[in-house]
Amino acid sequence: ALEQPQFPDFGQSQATKARETAAWLDAELQRQPWVAGERFTIADITAFCALEFARGLMKFVPGDEGMSALQAWRDRMNERPSAKA
């Protein structure tokens, strides 16, 4: 069961913020291969976990919202052996 009480207005505002943050990350990933720059770091792991959570909770798919760099990064992350485990 979900936490009670629910606050739909707050949830909606947070969904908007999440999409704004995803758009920012998409722009960053258009310039660099990984979240923190030129190499894979814990920032990628953390962002991947957050994005997968959003996929389940919000049905958020970056590619469906025009965020092609974020979608490509997510797909690369998902191919890593640790993501498949």
Image (spheres, grey):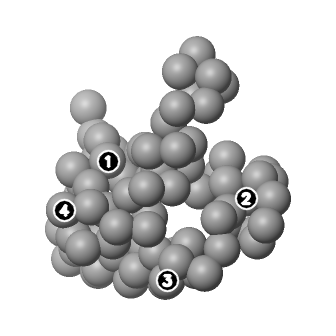
Q: Is residue 73 visible?
A: yes
For the residues labelled 4 and 3, the Cα–Cα distance comes to 16 Å
Name the residue beneath numbered marker 2: 43
* Residue nearest the viewer, comparing 44 with 19: 44
Three-letter amino acid code at disc 3?
Ala
Residue 15 lies, in percent from the top left, at 30, 71
* Residue 78 in the image: above or below residue 76: above
- In terms of secondary structure, where does tag 1 sit? helix
Q: Residue at x 24, y 73 (%)?
A: 66
| Label 1: few (<14), some (14–19) or many (≥20) C-alpha neighbours in 10 Å | few
- Check the picture and name the quadrant holding the C terminus: top right
Three-letter amino acid code at disc 1?
Arg
What numbered label is drawn on residue 55? 1
* Residue nearest the viewer, comparing 49 with 69: 69
Q: Say whether disc 1 or disc 2 marks the residue closer to the N-terminus.
A: 2
Q: Say whether disc 2 or disc 4 marks the residue closer to the N-terminus.
A: 2
What numbered label is drawn on residue 64? 4
For the residues labelled 1 and 2, the Cα–Cα distance comes to 18 Å
